Image (tube, rainbow, N blue to C red):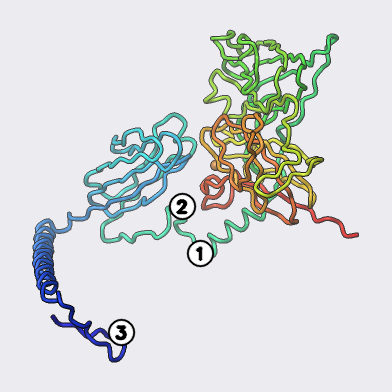
């Protein structure tokens, strides 16, 4: 047995002393070493053979040998990934990185992947492609127009230089990319026309019934500075006006539908008699264009609810027909100590605000019907507490992240939690509501955003589901 000199062996290092059974163990060692050597030799031979086959193959097929494997990712609502290749065979490795179902179609070739659920994958062999631009899109209704459209650029094989950045950054210098992002961020907060979530005052009828009037129609809505979309709105607002009533109140809602299709109003998370559930044609007839319908129920239980259209919701709701509906108060965990933090017995939050999430339709990725930088900043004084109710009226979940201040989740869907918990990111799925309390202890501008990063940034800059919590410093003295 030989001990090889190792460069890092300490000076004067000696071979290990022989032990009585060293003969046997060294024999065993030799056998193992021998087997290892044979395996290594076999592997080397295999590699040489493979290289030889590869050489033969390359030599045989000449310039046609270019095969490009491109990774393409589908999400809400974008097609990203390697979108250029030299002329030759192209294979797309498609992954659905989004939360909802998508597919990938190549318009010019009439080829497409299967419909993929979240995290689903498929391989799409496009065959031999000549130079040109090929349109990629998702064929699920509404997805292409929401942004799932991209160009696959096939270049002459000898002109090809792979782009290091995505297509959306093509042609921009580093300075230009930085400047676009910075300019977009410094535009916050931007003034736009229209404000949602305004409290709707009822008419009080002789018997004390609170009567609310809602009219739905298609209106121009400034979702971002200068960006006017066709919103489907209640009373000219996105989100629609906020309705607050007390427990035990008799409620009437007179609904007039001026949208181009039948509608109804579902009271999401609100306890009502079956015939007031607002699900046409099961519980009522659709309210046709130009018609008025009266809803009537008693607000029996406390609720952090919503109201929205049910018929044609995939058009009307995501385009703006959604709003907050609150019954009574959801109790805070007064005086409780949660993970070492005690909520004051007498805590009075400075505000109680809805944050309605949407990601689709004409409104798109937005907070309270506005896309950054048109989103409204949330302003609070240093040392005060704030309450935010999240409502997700979109098609996918949004992890809502507030910088610096943990959020105490104290109610889910308006139901107070027995065990409230602190979280810095609260994931809100479609239809869900979470109510959170936070303590604004440190002054400054703290960003507050969805943590799906493509919901907040694109090459042209910051947009979508971002706002800021602005904590005003306490005045001295
Ligand atoms: Cu999001």
Vertical side of 409 occupied by 17: above or below: below
Judge the density around disc 1: few (<14), some (14-19), many (≥20) Cα neighbours within 10 Å.
Answer: few
The residue most toward the front is 20
Q: Position of residue 56 (x, y in %)?
A: 9, 61
Which of the pair 389/359 is nearer the observer? 389
Q: Position of residue 20 (x, y in %)?
A: 15, 77
Q: Are marks 1 and 3 in contact (CB under 8 Å)?
A: no
Which of the pair 136/188 is nearer the observer? 188
> Alpha carbon of mark 3 to alpha carbon of mark 2: how far?
51 Å
> Alpha carbon of mark 1 to alpha carbon of mark 3: how far?
45 Å
Which residue is found at the position 72% from the left and 27% from the top?
Answer: 241
Residue wearing tag 2 = 168
Q: Are marks 3 and 2 in contact (CB under 8 Å)?
A: no
Q: Earlier in the sequence, mark 1 or mark 3?
A: 3
Residue wearing tag 3 = 8
Considering the numbered disc 3 on the image, is that residue within a helix, a strand or a loop?
loop
The answer to which quarter of the image holds residue 464 is top right
The residue most toward the right is 477
Vertical side of 469 occupied by 39: above or below: below
Q: Earlier in the sequence, mark 3 or mark 2?
A: 3
Residue wearing tag 1 = 174
Considering the numbered disc 1 on the image, is that residue within a helix, a strand or a loop?
helix
> Alpha carbon of mark 2 to alpha carbon of mark 1: how far?
13 Å
- Where the N terminus falls, by quadrant? bottom left
């Amino acid at each position: 047995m030989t001990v090889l000199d190792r460069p890092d062996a300490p000076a004067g290092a000696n071979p290990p002393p022989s032990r009585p059974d060293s003969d046997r163990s060294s024999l065993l060692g030799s056998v193992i070493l021998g087997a290892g050597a044979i395996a290594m030799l076999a592997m080397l031979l295999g590699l040489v053979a493979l290289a030889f086959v590869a050489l033969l193959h390359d030599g045989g097929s000449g310039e046609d040998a270019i095969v490009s494997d491109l990774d393409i990712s589908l999400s809400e609502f974008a097609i990203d990934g390697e979108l250029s290749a030299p002329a030759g065979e192209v294979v797309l490795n498609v992954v659905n990185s989004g939360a909802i179902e998508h597919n990938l179609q190549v318009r010019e070739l009439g080829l497409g992947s299967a419909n993929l659920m979240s995290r689903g994958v498929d391989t799409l062999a496009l065959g031999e492609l000549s130079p040109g631009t090929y349109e990629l899109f998702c064929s699920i209704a509404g997805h292409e127009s929401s942004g799932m459209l991209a160009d696959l650029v096939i270049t002459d094989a000898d002109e090809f230089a792979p782009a290091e950045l995505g297509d959306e950054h093509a042609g921009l210098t580093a300075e230009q990319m930085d400047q676009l992002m910075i300019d977009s961020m410094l535009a916050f907060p931007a003034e736009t026309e229209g404000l949602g979530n305004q409290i709707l005052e009822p008419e009080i009828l002789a018997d004390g019934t609170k009567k609310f009037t809602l009219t739905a129609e298609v209106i121009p809505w400034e979702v971002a500075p200068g960006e006017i979309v066709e919103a489907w709105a209640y009373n000219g607002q996105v989100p629609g006006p906020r309705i607050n009533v007390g427990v035990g109140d008799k409620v009437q809602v007179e609904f007039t539908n001026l949208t181009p299709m039948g509608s109804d109003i579902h009271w999401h998370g609100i306890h009502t008699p079956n015939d007031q559930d607002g699900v046409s044609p099961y519980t009522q007839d659709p309210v046709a264009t130009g018609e008025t319908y009266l809803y009537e129920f008693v607000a029996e239980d406390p609720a952090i609810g919503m109201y929205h259209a049910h018929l044609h919701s995939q058009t009307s709701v995501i385009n703006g027909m959604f709003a907050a509906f609150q019954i009574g108060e959801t109790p805070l965990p007064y005086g409780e100590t949660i993970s070492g933090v005690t909520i004051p017995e007498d805590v009075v939050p400075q505000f109680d605000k809805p944050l309605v999430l949407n990601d689709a339709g004409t409104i798109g990725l937005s907070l309270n019907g506005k896309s950054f930088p048109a989103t409204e900043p949330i302003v609070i004084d240093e040392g005060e507490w704030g309450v935010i109710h999240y409502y997700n009226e979109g098609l996918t979940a949004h992890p809502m992240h507030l910088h610096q201040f943990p959020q105490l989740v104290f109610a889910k869907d308006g139901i107070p939690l027995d065990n409230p918990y602190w979280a810095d990111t609260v994931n809100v799925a479609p239809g869900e509501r979470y109510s959170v309390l936070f303590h604004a202890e440190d002054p400054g501008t703290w960003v507050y955003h969805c943590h799906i990063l493509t919901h907040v940034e694109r090459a042209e800059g910051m947009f979508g589901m971002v706002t800021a919590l602005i904590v005003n410093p306490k005045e001295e003295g």
